[in-house]
Image (cartoon, helix red, strand yellow):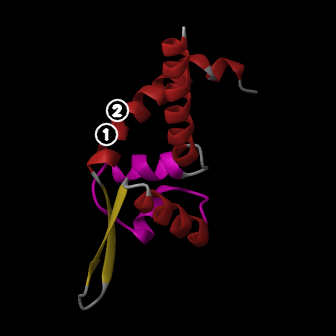
Amino acid sequence: MADAEAEIHACDAAVTLAFSVLGKRWNGMIVSSLGGGPSTFVALRRAVAGISDTVLSDRLAELAQAGLVARTVDAGPPVTVSYTLTASGQGLLPILDQLGAWASVNLERHSG
């Protein structure tokens, strides 16, 4: 029984870690938006309607620190900054698609 409890604890810890990043408002939408390829800050702000510049900047930094997003600076001129998903970030795309499909079936009927 101790092995089963250890497995449950390890799963709980992994899920908790995943949601500590993905559970923050906007992060899933940012990752999904970057699934279409590299994007600039301005394009991301347009794609994630309602997010402020400050929050977008903070979320991009958090996602980069988590290893999901890479930030690239092109010295230009003009200087441009683009954001892309890392391999780890790309790995989330099918999971986010599955989560969205699950939510549309299981949560739609319970909202409002």
Q: Residue at x 42, y 49 (%)?
A: 31
SS state under label 1? helix
Q: In this view, does 94 lie to the left or right of 101?
A: left
Q: Position of residue 15 (x, y in %)?
A: 52, 33
Q: How far apart are marks 1 and 2 (CA)?
A: 7 Å
x then y, percent, for residue 81: 33, 76
Q: In which quarter of the image is residue 98?
A: top left
Q: What's under tag 2, amino acid-wise?
A: Pro
Pointer 1: what residue? 91
- Residue 21 visible from this viewpoint: yes
Can you tell which of label 1 and label 2 is closer to the viewer? 1
Q: Residue at (49%, 34%) from the top-left corner?
A: 14
Q: Is residue 88 left or right of residue 102?
A: left
Total number of numbered discs in the rendering: 2
At 61% from the left edge and 59% from the top edge, which residue is drawn?
Answer: 50
Chain part drawn in magenta:
27-52
**Quadrant in the rendering for residue 52:** bottom right
Report the residue at 37% width, 39% height from top. Answer: 92
The answer to whether residue 8 is above or below residue 69 is: above
Q: Which residue lies furthest to the right in this view?
A: 112
- Between 50 and 38, the residue placed more toward the observer is 38
Query: Front-most of 13 and 6?
Result: 6
Q: Are marks 1 and 2 in contact (CB under 8 Å)?
A: yes
What residue sits right under mark 2 in the picture? Answer: 94
Specify the amino acid type for callout 1: Gly
* CA neighbours of label 1 inside 10 A, class few (<14), some (14 to 19), many (20+): few
